[in-house]
């Protein structure tokens, strides 16, 4: 009886391991190359927003897939390059206000680019399950001298992948309702 027990146990364990590994291999995986493609896509969208500012993107976008939650992408953006202070020690109130107004004007433009990136990511990340989320976060840089009243420091945009794809298929109907935008 002893001789029969161990081979059966070994066979059962081997079979179970094979079933579990086969099941895990059958699930599509979000791999690093997919994430990198979306990172580069978001970088490209942000860099092309404004021709007059060469330093809009302050570092490459970083993305991660969190199993059971979805894909998250973060970027750091400078909405407007500050005026140069080479010959003067301090900026005038008018210069500071013009800079603030320029940034305020650009926030909706950044949000529109983030929305497009969110939809594109949902369409391109096939292995992300439909009930999981796609998230894009933009951290907005600030200068120490800035008047930041009325300006967010972070914009977070998120939606369930299925709702994004449904809105895209319907020509954009329901897109606003599907996306949660939070400004901090």
Image (cartoon, rainbow, N blue to C red):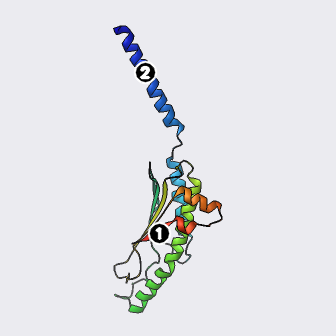
On screen, residue 85 versus residue 38, left or right, reads left
User: Could you say which is closer to the camera, residue 144 or residue 139?
Assistant: 139
Give residue 128's mark: none
Give the residue pinned by disc 2.
Answer: 12
Q: In this view, does 140 lie above or below 99?
A: above
Q: Distance between the residues labelled 2 and 1?
A: 51 Å
Residue occupying the point 37% across, 78% down:
143
Pinpoint residue 59: horizontal percent, then vertical percent: 44, 64
SS class, disc 1: strand
Quadrant of the image containing the N terminus: top left
Inspect this view and state whether residue 121 appears.
Answer: no
Residue occupying the point 44% across, 18% down:
11
Pinpoint residue 3: horizontal percent, then vertical percent: 37, 8
Pinpoint residue 123: horizontal percent, then vertical percent: 59, 56
Q: In this view, does 138 lie above or below 29?
A: below
SS class, disc 2: helix
Inspect this view and state whether residue 86 appears.
Answer: yes
Give the residue pinned by disc 1.
Answer: 181
User: Could you say which is closer to the camera, residue 137 or residue 103?
Assistant: 137
Mark 2 is surrounded, within 10 Å at the Cα level, by few (under 14), some (14 to 19) or many (20 or more) other residues, namely few
On screen, residue 30 versus residue 145, left or right, reads right
């Amino acid at each position: 009886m002893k001789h029969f027990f161990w081979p059966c146990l070994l066979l059962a364990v081997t079979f179970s391991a094979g079933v579990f590994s086969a099941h895990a291999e059958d699930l599509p995986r979000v791999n690093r190359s997919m994430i990198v493609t979306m990172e580069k896509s978001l970088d490209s969208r942000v860099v092309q927003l404004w021709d007059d500012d060469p330093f809009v993107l302050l570092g490459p976008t970083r993305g991660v897939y969190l199993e059971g939650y979805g894909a998250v992408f973060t970027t750091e953006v400078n909405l407007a390059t500050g005026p140069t202070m080479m010959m003067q020690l301090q900026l005038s109130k008018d210069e500071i206000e013009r800079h603030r107004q320029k940034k305020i004007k650009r926030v909706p433009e950044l949000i529109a680019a983030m929305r497009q990136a969110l939809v594109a990511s949902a369409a391109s990340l096939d292995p992300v399950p439909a009930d999981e989320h796609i998230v894009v976060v933009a951290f907005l840089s600030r200068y120490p001298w800035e008047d930041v009243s009325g300006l967010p420091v972070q914009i977070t945009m998120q939606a369930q992948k299925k709702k994004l794809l449904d809105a895209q298929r319907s020509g954009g109907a329901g897109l606003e309702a599907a996306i949660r935008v939070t400004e901090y």
